[in-house]
């Protein structure tokens, strides 16, 4: 991002307003992940309900960001770093909206899980994974504010850890299901939850790509290290 | 996935038409152009951008020796077209300007008929041996300038009676009538409305198939729309020269970035 203010100060206010909204959205999404996982772990129905309701405000901000970004494109014809910034807010807000949806889905499944016998240990593994995604999201938003490409690259590489955690959880759940078929319903829901958190990690990585593009002007190239082996290998419990 | 229109913009295989090496221009004490070396390609639109007084028009005018007419102007360095030094004493500036046509900011048709405006150049350069040939040159030129259909029924009407956009296209027809190889355009659309501007821009894209076009413009969007290569000038220096795509998405020099995004600096 270029140093210095625009001669047209209203243009600066437009761009600042867009970024502020994306960051506000980021804050709400972070809170949604934390609350959803806490609700799962503490079997808190009320908190889960709150997560589901709050998703609306995340969706609303995304709609506003899209509208404002379209207006900036139409009226200001942004180029170079300004254009990259506008493209990044559109894409980042879409990613955040998806992460919010996954958190909401997690909360929905929590309500069902409350009616089933608890699976010992599973919520803890899920919380560990969610914590890592939350940290990645927190760091990538920091990288966005600070224009810190190094931190964004770092986040991009950390997705591998999340993938590995997911592979481990996948095996863990297989074992539970084999031990006792009465665990299957709960484990299926827990597995979807784990998969959703793994997807949140992917969206966070995509945000990191956008942050890097905004700062450096190039899409980060090269393959990222991947740790999810569940779709390529046969695991037997 | 490949960008299928990238080939349309790709100029890497095009020959170099104009080459400048270490060009310096002085207006008396004022050092207006500082050591500019640049290879301008054939069949390519090259845009010169930069703030007022940055030297872009001065540099453009060096390419057909228009600065010769200014007494205090002094030019050093080398400028060659197709490998031939245009400042060689044996070069006739009048012949050179037939080869390197120019279109100016304000349409400036001669106070003559539309036909005579276009026929003037070919006549003085002896490009037509009879009336039929001259008629053909005039028609072809007006067609290339995308104005034939609008004026074919009133070729004897005065050129100055046309609208601004038509006058500018008439001037382009006049410039192409002498079969130039290079077309220099100094802010050719700044006096035109958006529709006339779009027509001239479309014309520039067509002219590119035959000529090397160099355009000076104050409109960033115009440079982005019509050119394949862009050079940014600042205080007499050529700061950055590259693919237009790159300059407008990810310029390398902070001065370019500041200028094109409209920042204080």
Image (cartoon, coloured by chain):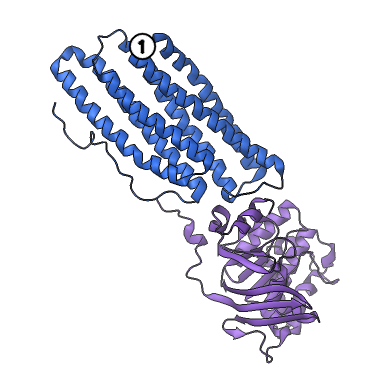
Judged left or right of residue B217, residue B156 is right
Quadrant location of the C terminus of chain B in the rendered image = bottom right
**A193 or B161, which lies in front?**
A193
Could you tell me which secondary element the residue under label 1 belongs to?
Answer: helix
Judged left or right of residue B27, residue B136 is left
Judged left or right of residue A33, residue B107 is right
Q: Is residue B177 visible?
A: no
Callout 1 crowding tier (Cα within 10 Å): few <14, some 14–19, many ≥20: some
Chain B: colour as depicted: purple
**Residue B21 location, quadrant:** bottom right
**A26 or B215, which lies in front?**
A26
**Residue B25 location, quadrant:** bottom right
Position of residue A105 measured from the top left corner of the image (x, y, whole percent):
38, 20
Residue located at (68% from left, 92% from top): B90
Q: Which residue is mark 1?
A: A111
**Residue A121 location, quadrant:** top left
Judging by colour alone, the chain drawn in blue in this rendered image is A
Above or below, A221 against A128 in this view is below
Position of residue B134 measured from the top left corner of the image (x, y, whole percent):
72, 79
Q: Is residue B57 visible?
A: yes
Position of residue B110 measured from the top left corner of the image (x, y, whole percent):
83, 72
Residue located at (51% from left, 20% from top): A56
Above or below, A120 against A205 in this view is above
Position of residue B65 measured from the top left corner of the image (x, y, whole percent):
71, 80
């Amino acid at each position: 991002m270029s140093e210095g203010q625009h001669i047209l100060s209203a243009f600066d206010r437009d761009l600042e307003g867009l970024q502020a909204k994306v960051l506000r959205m980021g804050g709400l999404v972070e809170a949604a992940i934390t609350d959803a996982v806490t609700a799962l772990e503490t079997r808190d129905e009320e908190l889960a309900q709150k997560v589901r309701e709050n998703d609306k405000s995340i969706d609303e901000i995304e709609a506003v960001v899209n509208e404002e970004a379209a207006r900036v494109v139409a009226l200001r014809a942004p180029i170079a770093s300004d254009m990259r910034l506008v493209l990044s807010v559109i894409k980042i807000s879409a990613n955040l909206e998806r992460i919010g949806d996954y958190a909401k889905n997690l909360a929905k499944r929590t309500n069902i899980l409350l009616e089933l016998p608890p699976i010992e240990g599973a919520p803890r593994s899920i919380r560990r994974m969610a914590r890592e995604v939350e940290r990645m999201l927190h760091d990538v938003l920091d990288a966005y504010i600070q224009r810190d490409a190094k931190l964004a690259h770092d986040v991009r590489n950390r997705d591998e850890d999340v993938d590995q955690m997911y592979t481990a959880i996948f095996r863990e759940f297989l074992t539970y299901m084999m031990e006792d078929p009465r665990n299957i319903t709960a484990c299926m829901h827990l597995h979807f939850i784990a998969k959703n958190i793994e997807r949140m990690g992917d969206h966070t990585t995509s945000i990191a790509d956008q942050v890097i593009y905004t700062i450096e002007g190039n899409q980060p190239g090269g393959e990222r290290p991947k740790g999810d082996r569940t779709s390529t290998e046969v695991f037997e419990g | 996935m490949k960008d299928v229109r990238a080939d349309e913009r790709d100029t890497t295989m095009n020959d170099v038409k104009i080459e400048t090496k270490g060009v310096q221009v002085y207006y008396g004490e004022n050092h207006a152009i500082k050591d500019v070396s640049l290879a301008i390609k054939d069949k390519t639109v090259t845009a010169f951008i930069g703030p007022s007084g940055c030297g872009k028009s001065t540099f453009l005018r060096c390419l057909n020796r228009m600065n010769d007419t200014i007494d205090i102007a002094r030019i050093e360095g080398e400028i060659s077209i197709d490998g031939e030094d245009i400042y060689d004493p044996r070069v006739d500036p009048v012949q050179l300007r037939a080869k390197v046509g120019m279109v100016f900011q304000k349409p400036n048709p001669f106070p003559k008929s539309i036909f005579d405006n276009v026929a003037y150049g070919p006549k003085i350069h002896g490009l037509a041996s009879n009336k039929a040939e001259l008629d053909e040159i005039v028609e072809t030129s007006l067609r290339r300038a995308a104005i034939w259909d609008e004026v074919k029924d009133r070729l004897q009407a005065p050129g100055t009676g046309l609208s601004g956009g038509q006058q500018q296209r008439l001037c382009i027809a006049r410039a192409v009538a002498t079969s130039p190889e290079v077309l220099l355009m100094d802010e050719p659309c700044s006096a035109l409305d958006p529709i006339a501007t779009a027509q001239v821009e479309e014309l520039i894209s067509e002219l590119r198939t035959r000529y090397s076009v160099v355009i000076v413009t104050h409109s960033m969007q115009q440079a982005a729309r019509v050119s394949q290569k862009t050079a940014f000038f600042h205080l007499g220096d050529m700061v950055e020269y590259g693919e237009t795509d790159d300059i407008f998405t990810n310029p390398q020099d902070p001065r370019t970035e500041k200028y094109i995004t409209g920042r204080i600096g």
